[in-house]
Every structure is written in structure tokens, then in C-alpha cells.
Amino acid sequence: MAILKTENLTRRFGGLVAVNNLSFEIPEGKITGLIGPNGSGKSTTINLISGVLPASSGNVEYMGKRITGYAPHMVARMGISRTYQQIRLFEKMTVLENVYVARNLMYKSNLADVLIGSKRLSSEDKANEKKAMELLELVGLADKADELPKNLPYGYRRFLEIARALATEPKLLLLDEPAAGMNRDEFMEVMDLVRRLRAMDISVLLVEHTMEFVEAVVDHVVVLNFGQKLAEGTFAQIEKDPQVIEAYLGKEEL
Amino acid sequence: MNRKSVIMLVILAAFLAIPLVDSNQYHIYMLDRALLNAMIASGLVALTGLAGQMSLGHAAFYGIGAYASAIVTKTFGVPVIVGVISAAVLCLVIGMLLSIPSFKLSGFYLSLVTISFGNIVWTVIVNWYSLTGGSLGLLGIQPIRIAGRAITRTEFFYLAAAVLALIYFVTTRMARSYIGRGLRAVRDDEMAAETAGIDTKRLKLLVFSLSAIYAGIAGALYAHLSTFLSPESFVQAESANFVAMSVVGGIRHMLGGTIGGLAVTMIPEMLRVKGWEIYYLMGSSLAILVLVIMLPNGLAPSFEKFIDRLAGIDRKSGKRQVK
Amino acid sequence: MLSIWIQNAVSGVAIGLLYGLIGLGVVLFFQTTNLLNFAHISSAMLGAYLCYMFNVTLHLPFVLAMVLAIILVACYGLLLKRFVYEPLAKREGGRLEFIIATMMLSVFLLNAVIVLWGGVPKPFPNVFGDPAKPLIIGSVAIQTHSLWVLGYVTVFVIALQSFFTKTMTGKSLRAVAQNQGAARLMGIDVEKMLTISFMLSTGITALAGILLAPAYFVSLDLGGGIIGIKGFAAAVVGRMNKPYVALLGGVLIGLAENFVVLYASSVYRDVITFAFLILFLVVRKKAEV
Ligand SMILES: Nc1ncnc2c1ncn2[C@@H]1O[C@H](COP(=O)(O)OP(=O)(O)O)[C@@H](O)[C@H]1O
Ligand SMILES: [Mg+2]
């Protein structure tokens, strides 16, 4: 069963076609790798699925429902969460608040509850703060809860962003190069974390450059080149595909 | 109750006692105006400090509130409270409309849109002669009455202080709740906030309307305080002044609007020395300029630091700050 | 009818070029600093008053008075950088603080002018010809002021263009405008370029102020908000990064308000700029500034 399906998804920037007639599926409960040379449209694909960019044409279908054109917060509410290639955090909020605020969509309390300080609000606050704390524990940041993100080492900033993405309780998580810029230890940790996500019943679309990472965690790989799907299959199949090898080699020669 | 709250209460009590010891009617009138300004500046603290949105057109809401309440009470002979409520409702609606450009624009472009909005409203006030009296002004607005007589300026002071307290309460409750967290997320990174499931448009709508309502209520109260309105009070420079209040007070501090509103209203008055009248506007703008340059975080954080010192709280080990 | 159209078009273009000149100054400033100076328009007022002082009070020849005024205002740009921009940058004041500081600065300058020269508008000497004796071509009457403006702006644009393309300083300035980090790596003295852009933008605005004075008088209006907003609107048309498009944007605004006055009440002259600004900003594609 596919949790998400794109159909002829296309995005143009002026004359450039960043994503070109892309149709692929993300199977439920699996880790799908999305790989391709630099500039092949991986991040743009994530932007299109998460609603950050509107598609020029084509469709995104999530759990059998068309979500093309949905606002990003609606996409998040439906159960799709993401991280960014360039980490984006709330820099003037504490580490805990960064995750806590992503629980906002869980609240049933309204403005009136806020103004009178209702029981419902305080119990929701308690539950959500606890959940945020648990997520910080999951990524190993619990002892940094009251710090500002700028005081975290680079790798931890990425973990914080993942914790925030998990706070909306996604069924599908889109990770855009989660290991980029990490040292060896952090790299192993993030790999471990991605594996644990599968056990948590979260489907993952993983954009990643390091083949070691992809090989170790993915169930299934989609290869992009110039915005088009070049190949698809298990990592072992992809690895031997002459077209894929050429796409990567061709890039390196440039 | 801890020492800090005691000190705060003492300062508050001292402030509230001013009209009882100083019977100069002009001073009390200026204090009344300062409290009204503090309401508007508090709205701007929420709008800009919390949510990162900018408005250089809030004099428009001040004016809309003032004229709405004046015209409604004059035309229909209804009590002032009805006028104030209609002013608030009208400002709510127009505030919602003004939030629409913020869905798309931010920073300087948004500030230019709000300036334009303020100027358009002002032009309408000046030229809609039959409704507003144009540049001649609107006369004979009913004052607020209790027990059949018009209230004194001192009584108005306590009324305005109560309204400001209510505004402070509402703003603080909101700022400390999940809504406040959402607003700060919008301020820090709008796109990340959206993809974290936060409806950023709805929050902007909320905070624009809220700050518009505050300004509208202040305007309505002003109309019934002065019983006379002239477009002069709602020019572009006033909008800038309101923002100056929120910045001088402290844009990221819950007390910023109150402290800034009081300080910026009172500074020119203190410089109004006999024989030096032509210098006082020059002097007060220079004073505000210097304050903004020397203290970009505003007076409120310094004020709080001072109180903490009095209360013997060590800032580093002290309890968590509410931002 | 046609002749009225032509007359309006000519004077609209002339006034518009001056709004555009102000907008061009805004763009040059924005490109290097990423800031909007809300006291920008004060430079126009200062330029006009100083020129008036040199020319009328001190009896200096007009061109000399104009040059002196522009130089003095450019020096004021230096002070602006030293005493407003730098301390704010050092204390990590953001855009909002810069906006408020410059707004207060413009109030301060308005009041300083009132103290120095009084608040009553002064007629500018007829150095651009007598407005009562326009140039008559057929049935069309054209103000000689408009022609002078056209001439001055043309000369100015040619000079500015050769400054940007021929001199080392001009090229460095453009490099800083395009990418400050890269310019720094190339060994360009970014700090010095910032200083130059402060002086350039205040000086250009002073020129615009002097040329506007025959239309607005030597008055506080030149330092008030509305002409300043027209300059910003022109800069917005230039997307804050195309100086010459900003110049054309000014022309657009000048023409629009002249024709509105022709067909509707003149009270709506200024509303046009604001409505134009809102529409232009809201309708166009999303842009982060
Ligand atoms: N916002 C944008 N505006 C213009 N071009 C863009 C934008 N985002 C991406 N592109 C272009 O689209 C292509 C695909 O980019 P991207 O999706 O980031 O590739 P990848 O993530 O695979 O490296 C690139 O050529 C890039 O320059
Ligand atoms: Mg990418």
C-alpha cells in the first residue's frame, strides 16, 4: 500500500523544469530513498509534497486523497512532516519551545480557554509539554531544553529539527539530507534514529547523498536526474543500473 | 508573595496615587492620554514583538475608533459603552482586512502598506465632511457619565488604568499560551511554522485584529475624554509615535507598551519649559532618537533588571523569564 | 483638450522624474545597507533650505549654492551613518529600530528647520524661469521648470552611469550592492562603500529637493512624509534593486497623479500614490524584503 503517490508532478522556475512529470510512490511503513545528483530536483519534490511550493501541474495523493494545493499547515495536519536541507529553527525560542510549539495543532482549547485559563488548557499544556520533552529525550536533547538553539552544536540542531517534525505525530516524514554536515558520531546517531522511526510506524522519504546511509536504511530507492525519474528499485538493483552510474559520473566530470 | 511582586505593587500603587497628590488638571489630562497611548503601544508589542509583523498605520485605528464612537453616540444618542463597543467591532473588521497584505508581505513592504493604509484613512477622515466634520473637527461629543454627571479627569484616569490592566491581562495570557508560542514561531520563521502545522494566516489575523481593537478602544475613550475630535490627532506622525512608544518601552517585553506609552507621552511634556517652547519638539524627538539608539531593547528590560536588583534576585540563577 | 493632456504629461513627467530621483536614492541605499531610511526625504528639505540660504540670503550664484547645498547634505549623510547607523548596528538594533530612529530623526530635522528658518514656506527664486511665462508651442504651454528638470536629470543619469561603469569606486559600489560577502572577499573596502552610499543617497535626494522647491516652495512639505512615500513607491516599482526602474516608477506616479487631478478632485492626488503602492505590493509576486 502506498501512503503517498505523485502523478506527473511538475514544477517550473521560469524556463527551468526542476521537477518534470514525476510519478512515484512511497510505500507505507517503509523507508524510501530519494537520490540524484545535485540540482536534480529532490528538495523541490519535498517542497511540492509539503505544500511549501505550489506545483505547476500534476498531483499529490496522500492516503487516497488529493492534497495538491493544500497550505503547508494543512499538509502537516494530515500527517506529513518535514525537515529542511538548510536547517530552520525558531532561533529566539528555547529548544523545548521549538518542539512544544509544533504541538499547537493538537490543541482543542480556544481563545476563551486561554483567557480564562481553563482546566482543559492546563491539562493540554501539561500533556503537550510532556510529549515535547519525550521527543527531546528521543533525540538526546533533554538536558538542553532551556537553551537557545544557537547554543547547540550543528548536529544537535538537526536533531532538534527532527524532534520538531515528529511533534506533529506524522505518518509520513520527509527528511532532506538529515546527515549533511554531520561528524561521524552524529552520522551514526541519525542513521540509528531513522531506523527507529520505521519501528515507530512512520513512513519516511529520505533524501540523502551518502550512499552508506542510503544502503543501510532504505527499503526502496527512487533516482532523479534533471527532475525526472531515472530509475527505481532496491538499493542493490539501483547500484548496478548503468544509467544511474552514468548520471552520477557525468555530474562528477563537470 | 515574593519580594519582586511586592516592589511591583508598590510602584503600581505610587503611580495610581499621582492624581490624588497632583491636582494640576493638565497633568492629569496628559496622564489620561498616556494611558490611552499605552493601550495602543501594548497592541504593537503583541503585533511586532510577539508576531514579528509591522504596522506604521495604527493611528488609523485610533482615529476609526474615535470617530466611530463619537458618531454612533451622537447620532443615536446611545450610551458611551455602546459607542466603544461599536468602535472595537469596526476596528476588528478593518484590522482583519489589514492583515491580508501580511499574508504575502513582510518587513519594509508591509510597513509601506500600513503607512498607505493610515494615510488613506486620514484622507477619508479629512474629506468625508458630512460624517466627520472634516478639518474643522467634530464637536459636542458626549463625555462619559456616572450618576448623571460627566466624569472628572481623575476618574477617567482610573477608568483608563482599569482598561489598560485588562489589555495587559489579555495580552499576557495570550502571549504565555500556545497561541503566544505560535506567534513567536511565526516571527522567527514563518515557513517552518507553517510546516510545523501552525496556521500562520490565522495567527496574523488574530494579532492584527487584537492590536486594532486595542487602538480602537483607546480612540473611542479619547473621543469621550476630549469631547472634540480633529484629524490632526490621527496623522501619520502619530502612527510613528505609537511604534516609537513600543520600541522605547521594549518591543519584546510584556510591560514594553505600558512603559513606552507613559515615557514617550511624558518626555515632551517634561521638556516643555517656559520660554523654550520652540525647542521642545526638537528636544523630545532627539531624546527618543537617543533612547532607541542607546537602548534598542527598550526601557522595560532595564526597569525589570532594576526591580530584580532591589528584590535581590540574581539574574543568572533567577527563575525563568517570560518572554 | 489635447493641449491640456500634453501639458499635464510634460509636468507629470518632470515632477515624476524627481520622485524617481528620490526613489533612486532609496534603492542605492537599500542595495548596500538592506535598510530603509525613513528620514530619507529630510535630505530633500535640507537641500532646498541650504540652497535657499546660500542663494537668497548669502547671494551666492545659484549653481554654486546648489553644489554647496548638495555637498553639505552628503556630509550630513556621513553623520547619519556615524551617529545613527553605526551605534544601532553595534547594539544589534534591527530594522524596526532603524526605522524608528530615522523617523524620529526626520521629526527632529523638521523641528530643527522650524527653529532655524521658521515654519512659513519661502518662494524659491525663479532660477528655472518665471512660472507666469511658460514656453508656448502652438496651444501648449510648458513650464520652463519642467525642461530644466529634464535637463538636470539627464545630465545626472549620464554622470551616475559613468560613475558606476568607469570609476573603480563606482564598480566596487555595484559589487557591494550585488553581494556584500563576495565583495569583501574580493578585497573591496565594504565599510567605505557603505559610507559612500550614505553620502550618495542623501546627496541625490538633496538635488531632488532643490529641483522640487519651485513646485513645493522651500517648505516643510519637502521633509514631510508624503513626498517621501512617493519616493519609496518609486523604489518599490524598481523592486528595491533597479535604480533606473525606480526612476521610471517615479514618472509613472507623477503622471498618474497629474491625470487624476485632471479628472477627479485634487484631494485624491496623494491617495493615488497610496492606493498604487498597496495594489502594486499586494498584487505582485511574493517578495521578501
Ligand atoms: N526557488 C527557486 N527558484 C529558482 N530555481 C530554483 C528554486 N529552487 C530550486 N531551483 C532550481 O531547481 C533545480 C532543482 O533544485 P533542488 O530541488 O534544490 O535540487 P536538489 O535538492 O536535488 O539538489 C536546481 O536547478 C535549482 O537551481
Ligand atoms: Mg536539495
Image (tube, coloured by chain):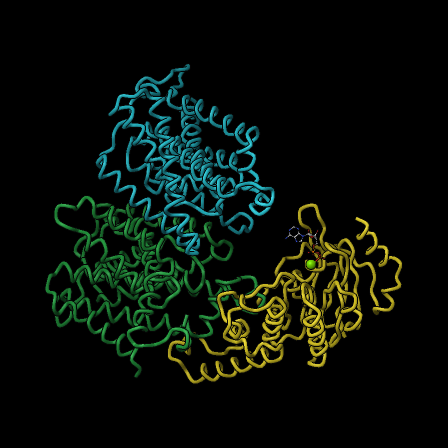
Position of B313 relative to B226 (above/below) = below
Give the quadrant of residue C73. Answer: top left
Q: How many tags in the picture?
A: 0
Residue C187 in the image, given as x and y percentages of width and height: 58, 42
**Which is nearer the eye, A49 or B181?**
B181
Task: Answer left or right for C282 relative to B298.
Answer: right
The answer to whether residue B87 of the structure is visible from this angle is no
Tell me the colour chain A is drawn in. yellow
| The chain in green | B
The chain displayed cyan equals C
Looking at the image, residue C3 lies above or below residue C46: above
Q: Position of residue B97 (x, y in %)?
A: 43, 57
Q: Is residue A110 left or right of residue A248?
A: left
- For the point 31% across and 52% down, the residue is B290
Look at 76% across and 67% down and name the residue there.
A33
In which image quadrant can residue C274 be found? top left
Return the residue nearer the eye: B244 or B284: B284
Q: Position of residue B21 (x, y in %)?
A: 11, 68
The answer to whether B258 is drawn above or below residue A171 in the figure is above
- Could you tell me residue B13's position as x and y percent? 21, 74
Q: Is residue C99 or residue C77 the one in the foreground?
A: C77
Tell me where residue C54 sits by quadrant.
top left
Is residue A172 visible in the rendered image? The answer is: yes
Query: Which residue does the image show at 35% across and 66% down from the upper left?
Result: B301
Q: Does C45 sit above or below residue B234?
A: above
Q: Quadrant of the N terminus of chain A?
A: bottom right
